[in-house]
Image (tube, rainbow, N blue to C red):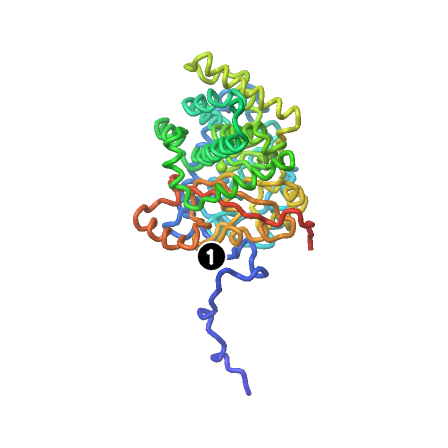
Amino acid sequence: MSLKLSHLPSKKDIKVVYPRTPSSIDPNNPPWPAFRGYHTYSFAYATMGHRLPTILGKAIDDVILTLNQESEEEHVKDLVECIERMDQLKHDLESHAKLRPIVDDGEADVALWNKEIAKYFQGKDFMNAPWLFAEAYKYRRLRECFSVSKYWKHYDVFFRQKCDTFSRSSDAVFELSTRFAEPFKHKEGMPDVDKVEAERLMFMELTQICLWGNSTDLSLLINMTEEQIKALQSTGGENLAATEKNILGNDMSRLWKVVNDLRANTGGRIDFVLDNAGFELYCDCVYADFLIQSGLAKQVRFHGKRYPWFVSDVTKKDWNWLLNSMVYGHLFPKATDAEMESLRRLGHRWKEYEREGKWVYEQHPFWCTGYTYWDLHSEAPDLFLHLSRSDLVIFKGDLNHRKLTYDCAAPPSTEFDIAIGPMASSAGAPRVCSMRTIKSDVVVGLGPEGDALAEKLDKEEPGWKISGKYAVVLLSDGRPGEKVRFA
Ligand SMILES: [Mg+2]
């Protein structure tokens, strides 16, 4: 029988079935449909077409401010070249240029970036590559503008803005410092059951403070007024009961059980994969402070970025700045002596934790790549092994959530364990908690009725996925204790 071409299925009949099978998943083909910049009306489109050029424009303004205060000719000339590279990047972004390899600037992640571009994104541009990768790539290219310079290798175009959010959050900063400067302890003679209940309530409250501290995200709230920031940051008790209703997927009770069980083994190791500097980091530290004082954790490890990332993400410099500003700074001219003293006490205690090794700050290069955490096991085996030894890994914020879930259009009812793939299913996977105020398209873990709930919100509250009003606190039990294996 001769072959007739008309018997072959026509191209349009070949439908991808979601979720894709594991072997057909790669960075250009997530398990569910990817978000891409060319999807008009999506947040990806708004980000790639408008938000990123705006952020870059503001970054250029910052460098010009620095340039205008520089006097050494060699430094001035070198910085002008940085600005020219930023102009080129802005042009590439706006003209939807193809993604080119990263220049070898001596960073630890160059090979990881260029491998991923060569394998999955040949000929792709800023708009047709998946949004997550394109957006991360932009921040890597911004890094390159400075890392190839002579005098400005470590310049942070976002540093001024990051410092500002903390100084502008004085009400919430002092509300927390005056409350928590005095170390947590129980009233004398309290029965053990009441002690545990008091700790549970404190844990629930601080979990929410840590969660909503994530609302202050500079890359998303670029035009917010001080009043609007204050409203987002209010930390009062009644407010917390009301805001708990906005946690659409809520595993906080399970989270408490996990943490409370750690105490039996004289406290566990808890890791934070950080999101934003300034006020959010401060909230994370207040939470971590309680975990140490209550004996729930004996060590907390914080994971930050090696260089400026998604505007407000924490770098080592931001970490040092926060602790030193709390102890030595003059950021709050209107504060009372008692308020300043409470902030200094907290800062001193946190520095002491660092000296004692109870708090450890780390910065693995993998956190600043375009890979999602589905590839953490294969692309950063050392980091996977390291995290597998943690009792609980808390991922803060929207970008970490996007990376955990492959940033794709999974149905909102998808179970968190399924949505994070190998981070839940690999042997030795740690317990993973995602604490995130919802600020982009991907939403999972809303329970069996989740699809209907999301549909209702789509109708009644357009923009609910980017407002930061809603949140999720999701927990995966992982496969802790099993031997980690690599193929
Ligand atoms: Mg961030």
Count of numbered marks? 1
Residue 229's image quarter?
A: top left
Residue at 62%, 50% in the rendered image: 479
Amino acid carrying mark 1 in the image: Pro
Please identify the residue farthest to the left as the structure is shown. Answer: 460
Q: Quadrant of the C terminus?
A: bottom right
The x, y position of residue 407, in whole percent, is 49, 50
Residue at 62%, 31% in the rendered image: 361
Q: Check disc 1 and report its element: helix, strand or loop.
A: loop
**Residue 288 visible in the shown view:** yes
Q: Quadrant of the N terminus?
A: bottom right
Q: Is residue 243 left or right of residue 263?
A: left
The x, y position of residue 454, in whole percent, is 37, 51
Q: Nearer the viewer, residue 410 or 58?
A: 410
The x, y position of residue 458, in whole percent, is 34, 50
Q: Nearer the viewer, residue 359 or 229?
A: 359
Q: Is residue 204 left or right of residue 463?
A: right
The x, y position of residue 237, in whole percent, is 40, 30
Pointer 1 residue: 33
Q: Is mark 1 within 8 Å of ligand 1?
A: no
Residue 430's image quarter?
A: top right
Please identify the residue farthest to the bottom as the structure is shown. Answer: 1
**Residue 218 visible in the shown view:** no
Q: Nearer the viewer, residue 218 or 200?
A: 200
Q: Nearer the viewer, residue 152 or 228?
A: 228
Residue at 52%, 41% in the rendered image: 255
Q: Is residue 362 above or below residue 462?
A: above
Residue at 50%, 60% in the rendered image: 19
Q: Is residue 299 left or right of residue 2?
A: right
Graded by Cα atoms within 10 Å as few (under 14), some (14 to 19) or many (20 or more), the crowding at tag 1 reads: some
